[in-house]
Amino acid sequence: MKNVKRKKHDKDNVLHLWGGRFEQEPAEVADRFANSLKADRRLALYDIKGSLAQARGLLNAGILAPGEYSSVQKGLHRIETEFRAGRFVADPADEDIHTALEKRLHAIIGDTAYKLHTGRSRNDQVVTAFRLYQIDEIKAIIAGLLDVQSALHVLAIRHIGVPMPGFTHLQHAQPVLLSHHLLAYTEMFNRDIERLFHAYYATSVMPLGSGALAGTPYDIDRETLSGPLGFRDISMNSIDAVSDRDFAVDVVYALSTLMMHFSRLSEELVLWSTDEFGFVSLPDAFTTGSSIMPQKKNPDVIELTRGRTGRVYGSLISLLTMMKGLPLSYNRDMQEDKPAVFDALDTVKAVLDVWSQLLRHITVNTGKLHESLSHGNLLATDIADYLTRGGMPFRKAHALTGRIVLYAIKKGVDVSSLSYDELKAFSPLFRPDIVHALDIKASINSRVVTGATAEKQVKTSIKKLEKKISHYRGILGRL
């Protein structure tokens, strides 16, 4: 093998926590390849938290004497202080943050530090820290998404009576309230929040005490350790505990669906802010210009949201592909779980930060919305419904209304502008009141079933959204 340098083995050098069985240290190129210190550094405080629990378990099991426990505890708290103050410096040769922390603890308290790993494997140590980290991140994302919900809630209240064209296939379909359209996204985000809570509960299971895969022979009471760590349950199978990454898949799936919803919202706002639509104006602070065209106002932040959806999808595919062929129990492939999850979480948190502010500064161009209601034959279905209420079977009413629409198109007008005499020529079921029926607000307010676009129902939905947000914030506060 060319250009492969191996470090000389030193029996007294604890460069690797597993080095006793080997006569040589790994090749430098292999060391660099396997090193995860840069990626998993963010788990440091959570590893310390797990180590404090491990120390309590060893104290209760009689493995650590009270003085030793106190020494470990003080040492870990000192490292925590160093880390929070930015004074903790890991050796680049440390293969991960867990190694770096143990080496630092040894430097502070001596060989007692090596007792801390009694009955613990990095397999259960790492996944414990990973779960603790993910729990906090999920709560932060739910809180950020609730801020976005609140911004949409404000926007919906502000424009409660503003009508707009509803679309199917990106074609004018039926009139709806703008608030009703905005609330469609709050429903999507409600489902996202529920998925995130599910991911939280799936994550909040403590694997500590599972050892490498078979459990620990020491009398450690796992139940008493789980509560102080903030876990709601403990794992029931030590093999599954160290090889389970469903909780990581769950959160990235939830984030992928969330980003899909943001991407749909992004696409609509990109379209709505064009000259062709002109429904909204985006705030200058969230747009950019062109390096060559002075008139441009580009929706870059929104477009980047749409683009970064693919990054989160990539994290999900990475996790699923990594896990699909792994035999039980732990395999080193699983080290790749954290970069995928970290990137997905970071991406979504950045999106939530920007959107909770962006939505509060969007300007709705009500004049343009009103103008768009005058074409596209939005009230065609209302004509068919009118005929149906007069006794005509709906399929026949649908066909007849189609002929009326064709007549209006050939005449170059919208069906809503046809006179009573013109409509009566198509059917004697038309009465003079049809002119009053062909009204945008009348059409909207006729749709009074639960969840429909009538202003009364939209106001009810807004109140329900307020309760939902309050309910979710309450759950979050109790976690």
Image (spheres, rainbow, N blue to C red):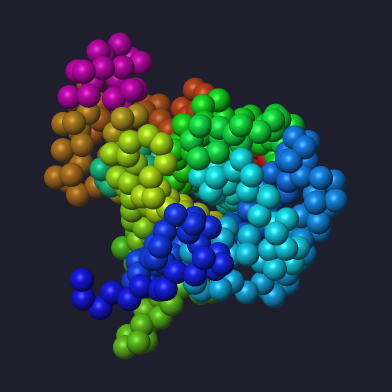
Check if residue 384 falls in the magenta segment.
yes
Horizontal and vertical percent position of residue 380: 29, 33
Q: Toward which corner of the image does residue 168 lie, by quadrant? A: top left
Q: Is residue 441 visible?
A: no
Q: Toward which corner of the image does residue 26 lie, by quadrant? A: bottom left
Q: Is residue 409 visible?
A: yes
Residue 364 higher or lower than 327, as above or below: below
The residue that appears at 59% across and 34% down in the rendered structure is: 216
Which residue is nearer to you in this view: 268 or 127? Answer: 127
Magenta region, residue range: 383-399
Horizontal and vertical percent position of residue 446: 47, 27
The residue that appears at 36% across and 50% down in the rendered structure is: 333
Horizontal and vertical percent position of residue 374: 35, 49
Indicate left or right for 42 with 402 as reference. Answer: right
Q: Toward which corner of the image does residue 421 lie, by quadrant? A: top left
Indicate left or right for 403 with 88 as reference. Answer: left
Which residue is nearer to you in this view: 76 or 405? Answer: 76
Residue 107 higher or lower than 118, as above or below: below
Indicate left or right for 339 with 392 as reference. Answer: right
Which residue is nearer to you in this view: 261 or 254? Answer: 254
Check if residue 190 falls in the magenta segment.
no
Residue 19 higher or lower than 407, as above or below: below
Magenta-drawn stretch, dominant element (helix, strand or loop): helix
The residue that appears at 59% across and 65% down in the rendered structure is: 100
Indicate left or right for 74 with 453 as reference. Answer: right
Horizontal and vertical percent position of residue 204: 60, 36
The residue that appears at 36% across and 82% down in the rendered structure is: 290
Quarter of the image with the C terminus in it: top right
Which residue is nearer to you in this view: 165 or 295? Answer: 295
Quarter of the image with the N terminus in it: bottom left
